[in-house]
Image: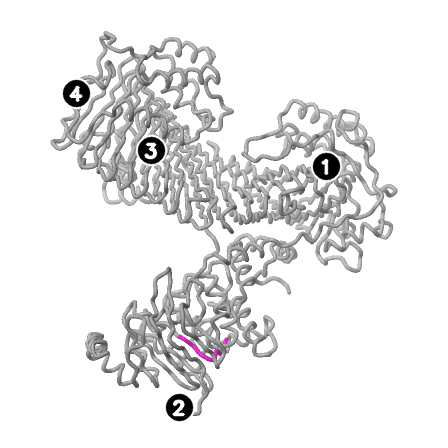
Amino acid sequence: MPQTNTVEEIVSQPYKYGFITEIETEKIPKGLNEDVIRLISAKKNEPDFLLNFRLRAYEQWLKMKEPDWSGLTYSKVDYQDLVYYAAPKQDIKKKSLEEVDPKLLETFEKLGIPLSEQKRLSNVAVDAVFDSVSIATTYKEKLAKHGVIFCSISEAISEYPGLIEKYMGTVVPINDNFFAALNSAVFSDGSFVYIPKGVECPMELSSYFRINSGDTGQFERTLIIAEESSSVSYLEGCTAPMFDTNTLHAAVVELVALDNASIKYSTVQNWYAGNEEGVGGIYNFVTKRGECRGKKSKISWSQVETGSAITWKYPSCVLQGDNSIGEFYSIALTNNFQKADTGTKMIHIGKNTKSKIVSKGISAGQSKNSYRGLVSISPNAEGSRNYSQCDSMLIGDKASANTYPYIQSKQPQSNIEHEASTCRISEDQLFYLQSRGIDFEESVSMLISGFCSDVFNELPMEFASEADKLLALKLEGSVG
Amino acid sequence: MKSSTICQDWLDSLPTTEGCLKNEQSIGREFLLDQGMPSKKDEAWRLSNFNKLNSFLSLPPIIDNEDIKSQYKSIFPEKDVNRERIIINPKQNPNKNINLPNGIEKLNNKEIEENLGKIVKSTNIKNDISVCLNQASSSNLLALKVKSNFNQSLEIIIPSIEEKSISTRIFLLIEEGAKLDLLQIFLGNNNSAQNHLIEIKLESEVELTHGLISLGEEKESSSICTLAVEQSKNSTYSLHSIHHGWDYSRFEPRIIQSEGEASTIIKGLQVTKSKEQIATHSLIRFEGPNGKLDQLQKAVASEYSHCIFNGSIEVPQKAQKTEAAQLSRNLLLSKRARIDTKPELEIVADDVRCTHGATVSQLQDEELFYLLSRGIDNKHANSLLLKGYYDEVISHFPKSAGKWNFLEKLIQDIKK
Amino acid sequence: MISSTSDTILSIEDLHASVEEQEILHGVNLLVKEGEIHAIMGRNGSGKSTLSKVVAGHPSYKVLSGSIKFKGIDILELAPEERARIGIFLGFQYPVEIPGVSNLEFLRVATNSRRKELLKSELDTFEFEDLVKERLKIVEMNAAFLERSVNEGFSGGEKKRNEILQMALLEPVISILDETDSGLDIDALRIVASGINRLSRPNSATILITHYQRLLNEITPDFVHIMADGKIIKTGNKDLAIDLEKSGYDFIDKNNKGKEMAQ
């Protein structure tokens, strides 16, 4: 197939976000020990309960082993060779954007996330995180009018310690896994969202994570709480400069949805993936989990994963409340030597809980793209349903696509259905489009986006174009 | 007792052999001594009931020509006229007193040396406990060659003995162009254990239909069976298996299409009741292009039982144009029962068609209601539906397999 | 309307082509001029569909020798999309289904790539919707088709109407319609045929590939060619199709044999 190469070229778009911002940074010395944790906590003026939270996590982490179960080999991380706190030098967090270092504003503008009043995305509030700290949150006042809290987690810790103490670590316990324990010990910043009872969040909320320092691990922590009958749509985006070393990113995201509440969490992940030989790139080892604690609550994850050298990520739903709903929509595109091991866990505990999984994996080059999932129905989850669909597309004969859907049922009055398929770009479909005058590149793009359309339809409108750029695809119905 | 001690005691109780399995024995024993028994941390054994596995090991092995009173049930259904039957009497070397039909010969020592263990080794399973258990405990080998001109049926019956553990090692070489209809019957006994390692090599153009009826006994019978099959070009291998009635059963069919270009059909059924745990761990690997696989695994779990299916399919780069379909269908009939199913697909070839699917559900209420509304009572309606469910697997067995009355057992034993 | 001074649109000379290493076309010659309607008839496997795929540039088909010229330009080196843009249109016998790709989007991108070639302005979403709604009338299609994925779940007749809709939007110079009539009921056949008739213009041409006479009752061809064994073995006017219908393909075989022997 002479055309395969060309298809590969199309999916190999150069990384556009690889620049480094020259800015004076305050870093603490490399290495991890109790003192470092106390130092991070002190820098943030944290209350005692949080310092204790960190120290307990650190104690657990020391006892844990780095996982090696997924068959992914990678050069091990030297945890003593990382910087656990790095922040652009500026006085304590600025009250207004005008005071933020223009270099930082420029950085985000270059990334397509303008923060200044005039250029902001309308109807999207943005929390911009640079290395370890949040530098700005837009539309805070407008949101506050509705009682919505959207701020950096550091700010939330000092302003709303009650909510933090009540919820942090309740969805992802500190000893959940190696990387979650590490995050709990050293997390630096991240976003916090609180939607009060009965409020439908008036705008999209979005966090944008930027790793700038090469030797800094990024450990952000996000917590979203949706009170009874509230709803919110949240999106995170991620980029990093190109370094030839591997940078560790180990985030924890916790979502809590109470009765009738709904949270939609979307990710467009475009961390630097390493070069064509597989050198450099981000290790993206994140723990994301949502609990549908209330009746009829709903948590929906959608993700477009195109970056990172290695991704381990399983955004999950614990469906506790009766009639609650969990959803997972995923597109993972890997190329060169990238490895993505992603999927979801749907844990059905409440009665009549429903879950839906749609996963689309596209692997090119010598990359490895795996779907790994668990659907578990516990004995009390009467009337529960799951439907899963996992499709893989292979481009070239050196890429691999693996599927490990794990199903466990202990409830006879429940139904689980799983379907999966593997394909490549069909020559007939390609010829059909070409024979209508559509050029080869665009035809391939159309076919890939067609393959992913079930998931694209789940992305918030505002970010469909972001995803479009990422996959270098022309999306149906997208703006422009 | 700790499982390591149990394993050690079991190894100590095993007789040693001077025969062709001598080398194999020491390999298996060394591995087990070194590695010990599996734990929850071994992905392939994670769901295994270790108490049951330990009681499997606690039964004493049978020793050649040992004078024991207990007998296996010697009443088997009458054999078909055109079906040759081999009964493996656990009490003696299967190579003695064995009548082989025309077209089937014993392998000579050279052939054994050339072939034995090769297939199982080529499956590349790490920490291959099931195989090591057999290697450590098997003293006798039944190694047969089915000649090219053979086109008949063969039946191999392996009964168990009460309070004893038996271990069989079988190697079948099926020569180019032969057609064989093989029916294997594993029968449990009260408080008995069986452990089999079967290797089958299909040369090119071979057609093998392999029926496997594995039926345990009410009281604590267990079985571990590894079946390693190598298929050469243009061969067809159809495996139809039923596992039922074992307190603990683990079946590991592993099929390697060594050059691709072959066809594999697998239809498996496992039905559990009371506290039984029955598992199938299958592996199918394509080592050349144009291979075909059609796999259907069905399971029914009732009462307190647990059915497990783990199905690996590997399609490496050299296996372009592979067409593989796997479907796992499960019925969960009780609140205390449990189903675990995990397909595993690993694909590194872009021009392939691979699909898999899994469902877990219950007997459909609408279907049941439809039957009831036609005046059929609940019991009959249920058994009709179950029969319908089993049919996809059972209909592929040769008719003569029906003599083993498993269908009635499969229906009677399962109460909704 | 045929005049000897008409310009040649398509000229095929001694075309040999193969698929999967097997030679299917053994020297096809065909000349199509402006305003002409040609019908190519022949049994299954005679090479009719192969000819259409080769003209459209399907990558699985290899041209071994001979030439295909479009308005005097050799097109053999052109990619399929380039051929489409200069005005070569293939109506597929079995239009492929493309799940997930919106029909409307597909039609718009295709139309714009042709318009670009014609140095016309590209149409935005709204302008295009106006155009497509007007063209839908030609094939009596419901606008709901536009919202669906390309050909996905379409019935046989709907697929063929979608093909004619594309023809109406792309306004090709030459349309090669491969068994557009197969699998159509009487009503659908009438709609498709009247669509083709309405779309034919004095400076364009049409090649109908068909098995049966019935489409030719609706669209009158200027030339009828009979293909067998990868060659055009007989050319005549519309009466040839009628003869063929009456006596079946056997009469061709006999004639052909006679001819071969004579040679």
State the extent of the magenta-drawn residues as a range: C170-176
Q: Residue at x 47, y 17 (%)?
A: B36
Which amino acid does the dot numbered 3 rest on?
Answer: Val
Measure the alpha-carbon separation of dots 4 and 2: 91 Å
The percent position of residue B195, horizontal first and vertical second, equals: 33, 21
The percent position of residue C244, horizontal first and vertical second, equals: 24, 79
Residue beneath disc 4: B75
Q: Are marks 1 and 2 on the same chain?
A: no
* Quarter placement of the C terminus of chain A: bottom right
- From the viewer's perspective, tell me whether residue A299 is left or right of residue B243: right
- From the viewer's perspective, tell me whether residue C258 is left or right of residue A286: left
Which amino acid does the dot numbered 4 rest on?
Answer: Ile
Residue beneath disc 2: C2
Q: Callout 1: helix, strand or loop?
A: loop
Measure the alpha-carbon separation of dots 3 and 1: 49 Å
Q: Nearer the viewer, mark 3 or mark 1?
A: 3
Q: Callout 3: helix, strand or loop?
A: strand
Measure the alpha-carbon separation of dots 1 and 2: 77 Å
The percent position of residue B114, horizontal first and vertical second, equals: 33, 27
Q: Which residue lies most toward the left here?
A: B81
Q: Are marks 3 and 1 on the same chain?
A: no
Which amino acid does the dot numbered 1 rest on?
Answer: Gly
For the question of whether residue B384 can be seen, the reply is no
Q: Are marks 3 and 2 on the same chain?
A: no
Chain letter of the residue carrying label 2: C
Residue beneath disc 1: A217
